[in-house]
Image: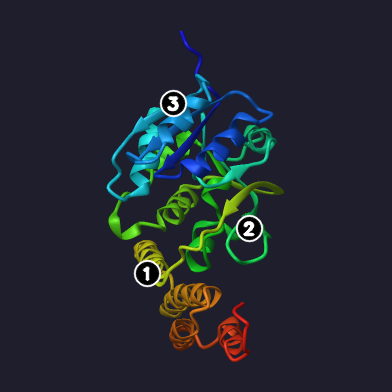
Amino acid sequence: MTTSPLVSVVIPTYNHAHFLRSSLGSVVNQTFGDWEVVVVNNYSTDDTESVVQSFNDERITLVNFLNHGVIAAGRNEGIRLSRGEFVAFLDSDDEWQPEKLEKCIHALRAGADLVCHAERWVGGDRPERVVQYGPAEKSSWRGLLLDQNRVSTSATVVRRSCLERAGLFDESAEFITAEDYEMWMKLARLGCTFQFLPDVLGEYRRHEGNASGSILRHLAAEQAVVQKHLALDDTISRWQRRARLAKCLYTAGRGFQASGKRLKAASMLARAAVGNPLHLRTYAALGLLLVPGRHS
């Protein structure tokens, strides 16, 4: 009888063969070796299949799965086909440091249900920067709901039993690009324990494809997730609801600002200020728009 691996790594992909080789290589090079990889390929038209085959590693499996543009469906398929006690997520354009799984498994064995580590954001025309997630004390269900997402998918390893209790990722079309945020809130609401590691154990790759449409699409998805969870608690005040939805607008405004779309940024930030006139960062962001050449 084949022994199940301790960790299952789920990698959804579509036409990312040029990145996938590095992503898979970063798993193969882990100091912790008790893993399997399920590559969920959305019928890519590039050489994704040959890239996977080139590793010649029986721990790596590729499955072709049509997700119809819903990445949550691909992740769920990977979870269902995998066998590990813990599930790690890795987007096919991101990478891990060699000790990532070893350090995360240590924290999970110590009692955490979800572990998320820091990442280095690379790529694009902006400087590299280290992003810390969490902290745990602000990652309760209400904390995630009323503030913001504090977890990164490619930096996360979670107990399978928690994912199953949560009903896996929500595949609703209205949540596309924010389905991970919705999952973390479901896990927090179930009482799952989050732990955040300060170690930089992965790289998140930024793409220059952050067009207006993608920012607006994510805004709509984040608003839909927030509205769903706000409806679960009638003790949240009207002002708290208004402030949280204004923060969605603020985030979109900052996205436009970082992309150099000053007029769109100004419009979004102005709407955020109307929604929550007490959020001082909104005025700071608006002020930066008045400085030539400053986007962030």
Secondary structure type for disc 1:
helix
The amino acid at mark 2 is: Glu
| Mark 2 closeness class: few <14, some 14–19, many ≥20 residues within 10 Å | few
Residue at (62% x, 84% y) in the render: 293
- What is the x, y in percent for residue 166? 40, 44
Q: Decide if residue 103 is in sight here.
A: no
- What is the x, y in percent for residue 25? 59, 34
* Left or right, residue 159 beside residue 67: right
- Name the quarter where the C terminus is drawn: bottom right
Q: Nearer the viewer, mark 1 or mark 2?
A: 1
The amino acid at mark 1 is: Gly
* Left or right, residue 195 beside residue 185: right
| Mark 3 closeness class: few <14, some 14–19, many ≥20 residues within 10 Å | some
**Residue that numbered label 2 is attached to:** 137
Q: Nearer the viewer, residue 19 or 87?
A: 19
Q: CA distance from mark 3 to mark 2?
A: 37 Å
**Residue that numbered label 1 is attached to:** 213
Secondary structure type for disc 3:
strand
Q: Quadrant of residue 234?
A: bottom left
Which label belongs to residue 61?
Answer: 3
Circles 3 and 2, Cβ within 8 Å, touching? The answer is no
